[in-house]
Every structure is written in C-alpha cells, then in structure tokens.
Amino acid sequence: MRKRTFTLVTLSLLGLLSSAQADKLDTVKKRGKLVCGVNDKLPGFGFLDSNGKYSGFDVDFCKAVSAAVFGDPSKVQYVPLTAAVRFTAAQSGEVDVVFRNTTYTSSRDGEVGMDFGPVTFYDGQAVMVMSKSPVKKITDLDGATICTNQGTTTEQNITDYFRLKKKQFKLLTFQDFDKVMAAFDQGRCDAVTTDASGLASRRAAAKDPSDYRILPETISKEPLTPFVAQGDSQWRDVISWVVYATLNAEEFKITQKNIDSFKTSTDPNIRRFLGLENNGAKGFGLSNDFAVEVIKAVGNYGEIYERNLGKKTKLNIPRGLNKLYTQGGLMYGVPFR
Amino acid sequence: MEKIPFYRDTRYISILLQVIFLVLVVGALVWLGLNMLHSLEKQNLSFSFSFLTGSAGFQISEGPLFDPAESYLKAFWVGIVNTLRVGLTGIVLATFLGFMIGISRLSSNWLVNRLAFFYVEFFRNTPLLVQIFFFYIAVVLQLPAAKQGYNIDGWFYLSNAGMTIPGLIPNGNSWTYVLLLIASVVGSVFLTRAIKNNLIGFLLPLVVAIAGWTILKPFGIDHPVLGNFRVTGGSTLSAEFTALLVALVLYTSAFTGEIVRGAIQAIDKGQWEAARSLGLNYGQTLQLVIVPQALRILIPPMGNQYLNLIKNSSLAVAIAYPDVFNVASTAGNQSGNNLQAMTIILLVYLTISLIISFLINLYNRSFNIQGAR
C-alpha cells in the first residue's frame, strides 16, 4: 500500500515536470525571442564589441534561426558561454541552441547528451608560437610549456599528439582564452593551441599580427557544429535545415540581393527551396518559405563566410574544406524535396 | 479546570510545527532529486560514477606525478593534493601574517599603525579574483621568461615559470640521517638544561648535521638543468602556485588581522595594567598575558577564515593552477559527466572543511577547559 502511494506521488510529480517542458520550438515562439549561446571573445566567430553588439560567423547563424522562426533576424538574445559551461547551459535549457565553435564528437553526442546539427565549419587543431621562436614544427616543442583553455577537446588532442611522438611537454589550462594569450605574451607559455580558426582569429585581433606564427601542422579533426539539448528532434531539425538552407542557396547561387529575382524561376528544385511548392518544412514547424527569410537576413553560406572570415576581413582564413563539394570542399546542402 | 484543546497546547503545537517543517524540507529535497533524475533520464543520461576508472587522457602541470594514461580517479587525487598544498600552506602563512597585522594595528607607532590600517582596508575591500590576476599577470609573469631568467647554473633559477632549486633524492641512508638529526636536537635540549651552556647546545645539532651529511651521504642531489624551453629537474615553486598562494595569504590575513585585533581589544584593560604593574614590558605582556586569553576569543572566527581560504583556492582555475576544481572541471567536460564532477567537488570541499572545523573545535575545547567559563 505504502509502495503504491509512493509510486503515485512520484508519477504525479513526474507528470508535473514533463508538462512544464513543452517543445522547444513552441517555447521559443511563445517567448518571442531565441536564446542563443555564443562565444563573445572570438573575433570573426562570436565577438561582443565595445558597443555591446555581437557579430561573427556563429552569430549570423543565430540570426538565421531567428529569421526562420520569426521572419525577423533581430529577435535573438545572446548569451556568452565559456567552453566549460556550454554543455550545461544547453542541458539546463538556459539557452535554446549553441553556435559556439564546438567540435562534434561521439562522447558529446552520447554521454554529454547533446544533439548536433550539420557541421558549419571544418577545422583542425593547430599550434601558434611567437614569430621570433626558432620552432618550425610541433615536435620542436619537446620540453616546452603549452597553454590552452579548459573544457575543450584540445587538452586531450595535444596530450595524445605528444604521447604518440614520444615528446615531453607541460600543459597549462586557463579558464578563458584571454588569460591564455596574456600568459603567452609574457613568455610563460612557449606556444598556445586551439582550433586553427581560433588561432587565426586571435592573431588577427593582436596589436601586431606578425608577432605570431601558426605552425603548419594540423593535429586533429575539429568539425565545428551547432548543438541543442538531446531529446527534441523537431527543434534539432529546425537548426539543421536553417544551416542546409544557407548551403543550398550557395549551390543555387541565390544571394541576399538577388533572391527576389528567383521567384519566377521554373526550376522545381529552386521553387521547392523558396517554398513556392511544398517542401515539407511544416513537418518540423516552420513555414515552407523559411529559407527565403534566412537568405534575406544573412545571405547564403558563402556570403556569411566571406563577411566574417573571408579575404576582405582581418582573419582571411582560406575556405579550404569549407568550400562547396562542387568546388572541392566538404560543404553539401541536403536537398529540399 | 477546563482542558486546553490540543491545537492551543504549546507542547503539541511545537511538535506539529517541527513535523511540518521536516516534511517540507524532506519534500523539497526529494523533489529536487527527482527533478534531476527525471531530466537526466529525459536526455538518456545516467548518474553514474563509472567514468572514474577510465583513462583521463589529459596532462596535469604540477603536483604528484601523473601520467595521462592513468585514471580520472588518480587525476582527482592529484587535484585534491594540490588544493591541500596551497590551502594548508596558505592557512599557516595567513595566521602568521594575520598576527603581525593585528598587533601592528594596535601599535602606538603611528607609521606601523597606519600601514597596517591601509593594508587591511585595501586587501579586504578589493575582489580576490582581481588580486589573483594582478599577482599572476602583473607581478609574477613580469619576470623574464625561462630562457632569459636569473640563474646560478645548476643551483638556482628564477623566471616567470617559477623558482627552481636543487631537489633531494632520498636513498637508503635518508631515514637514518633524519632520525639522527632529531635525536641530536632532542639531545641538545637536555644537554643545554644540564650544563647551562647555550653554545654547546647550539653546536651539537650543527656538527651532527654536517658530519652526518659527509659520512652518510643521505641524499642525492637533483640539479636542475636549463633545457631548450624550461628548467627540468630540481624542485620548483611554480608561478601559478606562488601567485595563488600570495594572493590568498594577503587577502585572508586582512581578515585574520582584524580578528586578532578584535580579540586583543576584547581583553579587559585591567589585564594590561596588572601586567604592567608586575613589571612586564610590552612584548612580555602580549606573550604571557594578552595573547593566551585572546586565543580563546579568536579561534572560532579564525576557523571561519581557514575554511574561506580553502574554498577561495578554487579560484585557481582562473590562472591555470591544477587544484581539484580545475581538474574536476576538465574531467567533467572531457568525459561528459559534469554533474558527477560537480558532486565530487562538493564532497571534497565538504570533507576538507568538516575536518578543519573538527580540528578547530577540538583545539578550541582544549583551550576553554582551563578557562573560567
């Protein structure tokens, strides 16, 4: 008898809890804004400037999701996250989605309990030294002190690399990358390591970028990917298809400027993409023409890339693996059909 | 006499209120626990500690020897040792400095008094995290880098990586030597009492120490060597440890200084006057009359500061000192067991704090038994 009462109480408590957690998309719509977890200290990807405005590659994808859900790219509340707290922030529902240069790995998908969207940036871990340092390749750093920030895949990657090459090193892990750079500038660290894109960004933001030199080797695969808390596949679909929309648009050569001229297109692929014919987007809770809103807000993938990381920016990161598959890269827009 | 109904009977009411309170507390805890388990379950996660036996795969920059192939459990252990290392050293130094500050605050010397006053007001009114960054980035890291550091080859190196001196490598004779030293010190104490000659009492351990060292060769010497990037070998006081320790000690001693001052001031003026009329000077008055009584007042609040110091040491994470908080955050992130890592952190700090409070209470009791109360 007592057991049954306990079970009843437990069940009713559980019921209360689960009814409180509705679908994420509905929650976001009701709230009237998207809460997006970003980096605030990585120029080019996510950066909070002195006017209190966020900008960058990842930030543009937050805007794209907002455009897809609300038809308005400005309904985003940005939450700056450190590497160490980003997963907890998604898990606890503090943020709806995280676009923050995060590597997609099996343990994060599995044990950490995240659901990942499509890769937005193919990256790899690299090492940066001072230009005046005699180091030419990573193994020259035998016996050196290398610094990085905490709670990232980089700590294990660099440890693995040195173990594999049977070299010694000392790893210092700081809570945030600003302190890593401070220690590096003072000569406490002989080298710093993180994703190549992150190093390029730090280098570009320096007073004199020629002080730093990025070593040529890439020691890992770092597919940077947006993620949401596990267990809401509809919401994950929304994130995925917003990213795919930007890729498809680049394949179709649809840009922020010329998108209206495609409305008269007779190509059924383009008509489905623009939502002029049914493309099934209603199934994950968006309108058929959500891609139009996305492209009008932020442009296609190539435009987002060039605006934040391309030749005309300080970062000037070659597109490399992030070119479309038709141009020798890995970027491939899954079809709207 | 009319019987009081139970709902107005204070005996019943007090029991009832306690029962209600207990039910509310237990209910809230159960609700929180269920909430956590439920949301974990919703995301297909389990609250298990089995990850602890897996290989950690990351490096720890200082503390007991640690290989990345060793388990997370060992990594946590290294973190705990590092926390205790900085915490216990900090407690000893903060007590010592606190006494100096507290007594200086009471000094009739204007300069000493004012300096101590500004010290206290400055350190207790600025955030500890800022102080830690300041000592690390603006002081310690301003030393030249390892290659350009100050050094006496093979003996002493000072750079922004830290300070390195030769280390001792124990061998078969080490214990004999240490025991011999202790015996000579004890012997000299007795000898001094017996023959009333301080010089011989002082010389005995010195002779034993030197003679023992040359004959037994009780330790090998591990000379540090300057490599391509940093000094290897020897024993090193790292830049991170030093910055953290200095900041913790300076910050905490501002508080312990005030506690010492308060405790001394709480001693009745008559005690001072009595000591003076017995012919004791200022130092003797403090040492023999005031401080022993002040200890009774200052031990409990001192204990609070010790606990604060240990907990504040978790700010180490900001400057790359691998304390338990730093290591646990990394481990939690790498293995995807943040909640478990946080639970371990809570339990570690709780255990350390409870042990310290227990010792403080014990010490406090031993002082109070002899007292008038």
Image (tube, coloured by chain):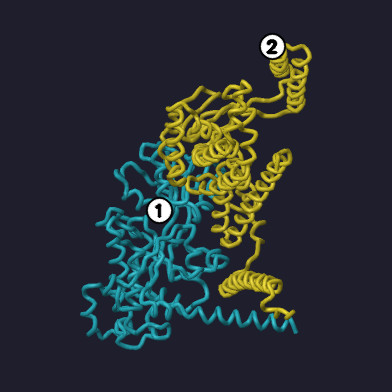
Q: Is residue B149 above or below residue B66?
A: above
Residue at 32% over, 84% down: A275
What SS does tag 2 mark?
helix
Q: From the viewer's perspective, tell me whether residue A74 is left or right of residue B126.
A: left
Q: Position of residue A23 (x, y in %)?
A: 47, 80
Which image quadrant: the C terminus of chain A? bottom left
Q: Secondary structure at mark 1?
A: helix
Location of residue A166 in the rendering, given as x and y in whole percent from the top left corner: 57, 43
Residue B136: in sight, yes or no?
no
Q: Colour of chain A?
A: cyan
Task: Determine the chain carrying the residue at label 2.
Answer: B
Instruction: State which chain disc 1 sits on.
Output: A
Check residue A196 in the rendering and tell me which mark sits there, or answer none.
1
Quarter occupied by residue A187: top left
Determine which residue is flagged by label 2. Answer: B199
Measuring 36% from the left and 77% from the top, which residue is drawn there? A32
Place residue A18 in its image quadrant: bottom right
Outermost residue on the front side: it is B1
Q: Which mark is residue A309?
A: none
Give the amino acid at mark 1: Ala
Question: Would you say residue B334 is visible in this rendering?
Answer: yes
Per the model, the C-alpha gap separating discs 1 and 2 is 68 Å
Where the N terminus of chain A falls, by quadrant? Answer: bottom right
Q: Are discs 1 and 2 less than 8 Å apart at CB? A: no
Residue B17 lies, in percent from the top left, at 65, 72
Tell me the residue at 40%/64% (across/down): A79
Disc 1: CA contacts within 10 A as few (<14), some (14-19) or many (>=20): many
Task: Between residue B35 and residue B4, name the one nearer to us.
Answer: B4
